Image (cartoon, rainbow, N blue to C red):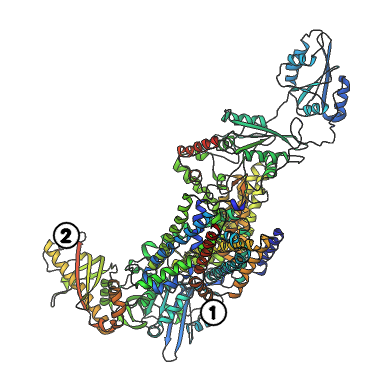
Amino acid sequence: MKTFKHIEKKSNGIHGAPQTDSKETQNQSILSTIDENFDTIVSILGNDAGVTNGKYSISNNEVEIGVAYVGCMVDRATISQQVIDPLLNCQFDSSLNDILMKVQSKINLPDVKIASDIKQVIDGLLNGNTVLFIQNVNAALIIGSRKVEKRSINKPSNEATVLASLDTFTEDLDTNLNLIIRRLPTADLCFKEFIVGNLSHTKVKLFWIGGRVDKKILEEVEHRILHISLDNINGIGELAELIEDKPLSVFPKYRQTERPDVVARNVVEGKFAILCDNSSFGFIAPISLWDNFKTMDDYSERVLVSTFLRMVRLLSFFIATTSSSIYLAFVTYDQSIVPPSLALNIAMGREGVPFPSVLELLAMTFAIAVIREASLRIPGSVGYFIGSLAAIVLGQAAVSAGYVSASVIIVVAIAAIAAFAVSATTLVFPMRLINYFLILITGVLGMFGLICGMTILICHAVSLESFGMPYLYPLVPFNRKAMMNTFIRAPLEIINRGSKKAKKEKARG
Amino acid sequence: MEKNDKLPIEQIIAFSFLGIIGNVVYIHTWIDHDTDRSSWLAAFLGILLLIPFALWILYLGKRHPQYNIFDILYNRLGKIPTGIICILFIFINVAVAVTQLNMFTQMVHVFLLRSTPSWVIMFLMVSMCTWIVQKGTIKMGRLITVLTIIGLINYLGCFVFAFPSDVSVKSIIPIFDTTLIGFIKGTIFITCASSEYLLIFMVIVRHINKCPKYDKWVVGGIVITAIIFSIAILIIIAMMSPELAKRIAFGGVNAARIIHIGEFLQGLELLVFITYQFIATGKTIMSLYCSWDSAKIVFANKKPNLQLMILAFLIIVPSIWLNSYNVAYYLAVFMSKFIILPFVILVLLLTTVSSRIKRK
Amino acid sequence: MIKRMISLILVIVLSIPLSGCWDYSEYDSLAQIIGVGIDFNPQTKETTVTIQYISTSKPEQSSSGSSTTKSLSGSQGIVHSASDKTVVGALTKLQQIIIKKFFFGYMKVVVVGKEAAKRDMADIIGLCDRTPSMRSTTYIAISSGKAKDTLSTIDISGTVSSSQEIYSLIKKGTGITNPTTIEQFEEMLTISGWEATAPRVVTVEKKSENSKTKNTQKDMDQVLFGDQKVEGIAVFKKQYYKGALNEKESFGYCWITGKKVTQYKTSSLPKGDKRENLLYFTMSDSKSSIKVKLEKGKPKVYIAINVKAELNKYSKDASDEITPEVIDNMQKSLSESIYQDVKAALEKCQRKYKTDVFGFGFELFRKYPKLWQTEYMEKWDKIYPKLDVVIRVNAKIQNTGTTTGKLIVE
């Protein structure tokens, strides 16, 4: 597979990513006195970072401990109830050997780690953990006490379905993992965690079903994630661009979804998925072009219905990309295919319009893009009003004033609506872009240009590979079993028969 | 890695389909004088007669796995004789591409773009094909498969509408209204014209898996093409009687002008034109690819991309200079009658002889 | 290196749109021609070409215009004529006066005048066939006079153009005729043993004053009010117009060639019988099969015609109840009537025009291809007029309408 680049694994800290922070120094160790440690923390993080610290004497005033945390990140109830209280009420025997282990055993939380240098302490503090120093001990305990602020689980806004489940991911990685593991409570589900982003330290989790994904693909994904050296990873979108091959291509080679059931289904089918902290989307790869047209409704509806709906989506993909250019080709270059009565209507509609059809089409398509952008961002109820106003203004007034002809508006509206009928949000805007390209090339060379444009697009799609899987997979490297779930949705028995065989073959070799 | 890529079955079928019906879609009218109503049968038998040659090439390929015919010649005969043959091969491929491009461009001229200069159309086609060929065998094969599938569905879908009203049995029966000699002449002409496929097959034989399943499909691809092409000719003859079909210049596109669905839909030749564009694209890609492959053998893989550019240039310039449908038609007929199949036979004989000699 | 080459190519390719789109043409710059008429003047030896196209300008919203001017714009079609030595010369002249570019893709009908049909038919067909912009699914009609007059005649109700009217009449087959497209006409021309026919259009002028119907636009000809009638079949020998078949003979032609006739028909009467005894029928189906057999070296034609009909009017003197024998008699008299039609058609085509429009030669070719090509093809012109034709008509009356008995007037 040509696109795989071999990259040397860089040396890791605990969490496995190279870090070049300016403030943190690697070799600073934990000092013996609590006060000195507190001073070190304040000097690194600054006075106003919100670090709270306190000292306690426990075990009949024999042992002194110091507790520090960043106030906005911790759950204070946990600290006071599970950490401070038990320690205050405990009694150690007089020997101070292994005081660290003894203290650890008294704390009511299992999430306790031992830290040996300041870097781990700072990391721990910034992740919402509480740090516990013991006087005269050159180590610290890092106790998990994070307070997670998260949204509740809502209905999907972008990928609505009718009969399938309606929960979505949130920004908290743990909640998302909960939603996934709940659907696949099997030991075959394998995980691997990474930390990416020099400043954001974003936790990234890669998971797959063991035995169903090629080892080479997993190695390649790991290499690419480790090679990321960006400061800030804001979400799956950025992560995806950094690890996909040919990011400049117009087609998306991964699937980005906000629904856990989609992720679960795809993982079962043999793809891997990535979830990332602070992002309510999941990343699925490797996919083919046809995977963008599958929704969860396909599996909840009956066979005939879902086959028909899949055809509708495929057809709307075709319509959204080519309807404007077909209209242009038929009206300006190859008029003989238009039915005669329709031809008269179009001709009469065009009387008096000052712009050539190409310009009209481009201007209207662009106008619809502007309207969409605007209506996304206009607050609240005003948004609906502006949307309908724009439609009415464009539709009615522009036609009556003679700026555009009515047929152009119909064609452009059809193309815009058909673009949204496709279920994958990552494919909607590529379709609009392809639309512009095809309009331009049709405007110069008519039907011949349109077909040249389509050939160029097909050639581009054919040469894409998504992590080793050819982009037009069940169609071009033809695979009969996989075709059962591509353009049609065959009954589940037939689909699963295929995957059982694939599973057996993979297990064998 | 290029040498070891194996073509899957559907790509073999697609290669055989687009390879065989390259120039034949335009020059099949040449045999209509001799075969009249039985031209579809002549086409069917003519294409089937390619099978022995294809099997011969496959046999040679099996004796030397991982090589194509020119590799074998290079190994056995040395640089200079192979160089001469390869250069002849390049010229034949370029000539095939030039005729195909010219006939297609004039079809675009006649039906679609009347005032656009020919060089624009040719330039666009050749640059697109160069870009595609440069990506490699497997991706080229995938593209050709997709084009074949869409082209076939499109063509048969359009002609389905011809059935109730425009097809008349009188144009088909009686089938044998010509002499046997005329029929045989027609059949042999079709064989010679479709032996352009052998030119391609000689080059891609190293990418074919040498097991019985794939052998079956090499033959199967040729049979499928024979069936589809003869059905296409049958439909054309049935729609316009064979006397009219003798004179048409552009095959199915002419015939599709007659189809109308009720009063409101006519002019379906525009959709059939899509199939012809795919055929022209596929054929140009294959000719370019074959020339490139043998050029790489002659010039020992130095700067292959530059060689590709030069070949593309070699195709465009004569096309623009020629710029005529009728001259291209007669050139294609001339090449089919006297050049392509004899050349193929010569090369295969040479290869067989040289491979046997060294074995001894 | 390859990337630089490709970007260079891309730059060149993308600069193509900057130089202009060569074939770009908007709808409103096209004149959608729906009918073409071709005439030949034997005195001046000039060809007159008439074109009719629909104007696509928005109808003017004037309430004060007279009804005639309003009805002449819009869907009526605008007619122009020009004369020159050749058809393309005349077309060039026409293009010089009409601002919009001619677009022949929607052409419905080509009307050829009688004089032109006598001389130039092959040229006209050749032109229409080879020019890609003219479609060969256009219908052909031979005008009984001049094509120019035919196209200039407008129906007084004023809703459709004359080309549209002729087209609808030919297609629907309200007259007894043989709808022929250019492609079918060409087929008949090129197939040996089958001569060409085409529908015939007769224009009947309205006997009203036509002085106030002058067109306000750039028209140069007078617009006439009248009716189009598609009646009869024009008969050709090779490419030359020979004559026309009248209604009875056209019926015969349609029976022989198996065209589906759905018309009214009357039965024949024995001599001296009363007019009230005529039976009226509606034909619902008709089929025919032509077989040519060689008997003693001479070809003999067997025509079998099967017709299905429905009774519409019963005869006055027949029996009150319609029994099977009555049905039998009616069938016989219908068959007799059809036989007469067929004979009339054969008489005219064989004896008078001597042209094989029925395709007997073609049927002989289909049965004995070798013999046709070696022997009969050259001699067919001599053999055909003396050809022996055996006609067998089988008429079947399926039902007698909504009533069975006779209408007895008390």
Identify the residue under disc 2: C404
Residue A506's quadrant in the figure? top right
Identify the residue under disc 1: C95
The picture places residue C301, in percent across and down from the top left corner, at 22, 75
Question: In which quadrant will I find the C terminus of chain C?
Answer: bottom left
Against A16, residue B127 (above or below) is below
> Which residue is located at x 73 percent, y 20 percent?
A78
| Residue type, label 2 | Thr
Asked if residue C182 shows in the view, the reply is no
Front-most of A476 and A40? A476
| Residue type, label 1 | Gln
Q: Secondary structure at mark 1?
A: helix
- Which chain letter goes with mark 2? C
Q: Is A503 displayed left or right of A204 in the figure?
A: left
- Which chain letter goes with mark 1? C
- Residue positioned most to the bottom: C43
Residue B176's quadrant in the figure? bottom left
Tag on residue C280? none
The span from disc 2 to disc 1 (Cα, nearest Å) is 63 Å
The picture places residue A471, in percent across and down from the top left corner, at 58, 48
- Residue positioned most to the front: B360
